[in-house]
Image (cartoon, helix red, strand yellow):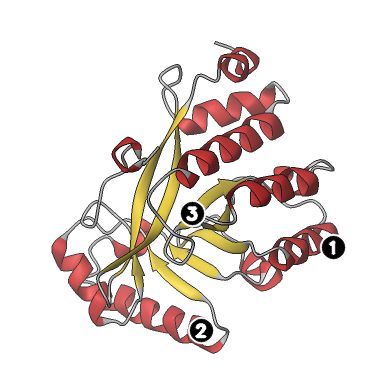
Amino acid sequence: MSIETLLRKDDFFHYYQPIYNIQEWTLVGYEVLFRSDRFNSPEQTFELAKKEKKLFELDTKSICKAAKTYSLSSFSKCEGTLFLNIFPSTLLHTQFPSFIKNVVNQVESTCRLVLEINESGKVSNFDRFSKIISMLKSIGISIAIDDLGKGNLEIKSILEYEPDFIKIDRYLIDGIAENLKKQSMLKLLKKYCGEFGIELIAEGIEQPKELAIVKSLGIEYGQGYALGKPSPLLNKIMR
């Protein structure tokens, strides 16, 4: 199936993985995860969209569909934070400002939006990118840096994007109960984030002992199979 056909048939859906405040044991929101039965993986889908020059269309349609589905859930704005992945090229597209303002107008009463910048795409124009980030923050949208510790994230991104959230990759969480170096790294990240008002989220928490260590280190937010698997929101829709 081509991406054009996928878009025309609206043949994709989303799973939502919960994010918790692990210090207070409260649910704070969800990360949106793209799914389609027509492709082996989201990565394959978006790579094909890039080759077919349909990446902006797929990215924005996915965001719009996910946000509308979420807006029908049982969350109020004070507790419904929605984390949406986005490519840098989408942010830099000339039609993006009008698109995202329209999305905000549709869902602002039901959820807080956080855009997770996908680091698989490169930023070609940091000056324009910075202006887009400022515009997003001015209309109430927060910014998250994804996959810190995965290996492909540049320090420049953390400094230039001025993120509201940093998400720690599974690499730093895997085996952390036995790894003092990883524990020390998380302490340093927590200190940095605390100094600059950035919220830190530990992704990929799969084992109870990992959750226990991350919590003991004072990390406020967590995400992973130990807290909740990705799933549809059908059981939460109220109308």
Q: Amino acid at mark 3?
A: Leu
Tell me where residue 201 appears, x and y as whole percent: 41, 67
Q: Residue furthest front?
A: 239
For marks 2 and 3, give the one nearer the viewer. Answer: 3
Q: Earlier in the sequence, mark 2 or mark 1?
A: 1
Q: Nearer the viewer, residue 188 or 139?
A: 139
Give yes or no for contact between labels 2 and 1 (Cβ–Cβ under 8 Å): no
Q: Residue at x 35, y 64 (%)?
A: 172
Q: Residues within 10 Å of mark 3 (few under 14, many from 20)?
A: many
Q: Residue 105 placed where, x, y %?
A: 67, 50
- Of badges 1 and 3, nearer the viewer stands 3
Q: Give residue 208's quadrant in the image.
A: bottom left
Residue at horizontal 33%, vertical 35%?
234
Q: Secondary structure at mark 3?
A: strand
Query: In the rendered view, does 27 fall on the left or right side of 7?
Result: left
Location of mark 3 (residue)? 82
Nearer-the-camera pick, 80 or 39: 80
Residue 192 — which label? 2
12 relative to 187, above or below: above
Res. 127 mark: 1
Please name the residue shown 65% across and 46% down the image: 103
Which quarter of the image is occupied by the C terminus?
Answer: top left
Displayed quadrant of residue 185 = bottom left
- Callout 2: 10 Å neighbours few (<14), some, many (20+)? few
